[in-house]
């Protein structure tokens, strides 16, 4: 994986979209300490479709402009989602048609093309979103190999992530997690409440999770989610998809004389 490259997906038109790439996307990506990559600017490209596949898989993150229903754009977005890539979606006010079903539940940065200020806001929004997603280094889902995609029992990407979120936030294998925590963690990863609810409903339907309802002494209902034996079995068989380690937080405090004291 290239830990510094942001793969850019957009129409190539030698006109307004190319101008947005040069004037907005490139500065925004570089402000996030990343290097923009667009396939048409790579002189080493020989077979574009093969290189697109490889470069998306190797990229650290993806930025996609879905303002138009461009077949190449949707193909590359599909690849990025299949590989479990973090993706920043942007869309201009020029788009008048609904988003595809599997896209409309995702976080999308809308932007205005009518004023210079609209593009300035877009540049800042892209930088902030890239920085936010890249800051989550301990990602739940790792990139898949092509063999994984072909051989695994396939469930939607948001279901794989939701299963990892649940498993990562319970204190014991037989425990459960409050549904509000699941929604919060999924929001942090770029999935809104609709996407989370669809994922949980799908996981419940295939019997990978149980939905537990508990009532307090005042008659208020709270909902918790646990992972079933079938769910744990799937996780175990596909554990290569998940990040099972984390980096210890760095201590950036200025050292003082107290740091040498014996810790009681």
Image (cartoon, helix red, strand yellow):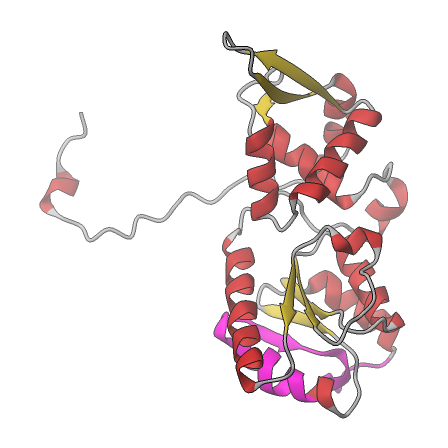
Name the spot of residue 53 as percent of width and height, x first. 81, 66
In-image side of 247 versus 68 (left or right): left
Would residue 152 be found to the left or right of residue 141 on screen? right
Q: Is residue 156 above or below residue 223?
A: below
Residue 193 picture location, percent across and down: 66, 42
Magenta segment boundaries in residue numbering? 19-46
Task: Tell whether 2 sits left or right of 84.
Answer: left
Query: In which image quadrant can residue 73 be found?
Result: bottom right
Q: Is residue 41 visible?
A: yes
- The residue depicted at 85 percent of the width and 39 percent of the height is 152
Q: Residue, x 58% and y 11% (percent of image)?
A: 215
Q: Residue drawn at (15%, 31%), measured in percent from left and top?
A: 262
Seen in the picture, residue 246 relative to 163 is either above or below; the reply is below
Q: Residue 183 lies in what quarter of the image?
A: top right
Q: Quadrant of the N terminus?
A: bottom right
Residue 142's x, y, as percent? Answer: 67, 47
In the rendered image, the residue lying farthest to the bottom is 14
Visible residue check, residue 241: no
Asked if residue 39 is among those painted magenta in the image, a careful observer would answer yes
Residue 233 quadrant:
top right
Residue 165 in the image, given as x and y percentages of width and height? 62, 35
Work out which quarter of the rendered image holds the C terminus and state it.
Answer: top left
Q: Nearer the viewer, residue 260 or 20?
A: 20
Residue 131 lies, with reference to residue 73, above or below; the image says above
Examine the structure image and report whether residue 175 is included in the region drawn in magenta. Answer: no
């Amino acid at each position: 994986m290239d830990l510094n490259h942001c793969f850019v997906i957009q129409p190539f038109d030698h006109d307004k979209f190319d101008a947005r790439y040069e004037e907005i996307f490139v500065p925004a990506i570089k402000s996030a300490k990343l290097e923009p990559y667009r396939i048409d600017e790579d002189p080493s490209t020989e077979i574009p479709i093969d290189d697109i596949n490889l470069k998306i898989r190797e990229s650290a993150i993806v930025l996609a402009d879905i303002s138009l229903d461009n077949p190449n754009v949707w193909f590359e977005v599909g690849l990025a989602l299949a590989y479990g890539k973090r993706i920043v979606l942007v869309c201009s006010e020029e788009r008048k048609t609904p988003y595809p079903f599997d896209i409309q539940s995702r976080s999308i940065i809308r932007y205005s093309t009518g004023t210079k200020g609209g593009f300035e806001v877009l540049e800042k929004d892209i930088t902030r979103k890239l920085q936010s997603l890249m800051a989550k280094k301990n990602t739940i889902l790792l990139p898949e190999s092509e063999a994984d995609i072909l051989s695994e029992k396939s469930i939607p990407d948001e279901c794989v992530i939701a299963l990892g979120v649940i498993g990562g936030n319970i204190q014991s294998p037989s425990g459960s997690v409050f549904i509000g925590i699941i929604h919060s963690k999924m929001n942090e990863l770029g999935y809104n409440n609709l996407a989370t609810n669809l994922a949980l409903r799908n996981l419940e339907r295939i019997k990978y999770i149980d939905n537990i309802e508990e009532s307090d002494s005042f008659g208020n209902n709270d909902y918790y989610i646990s992972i079933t034996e079938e769910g744990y079995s799937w996780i175990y068989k596909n554990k290569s998809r998940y990040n099972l380690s984390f980096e210890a937080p760095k201590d950036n405090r200025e050292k003082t004389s107290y740091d040498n004291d014996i810790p009681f």
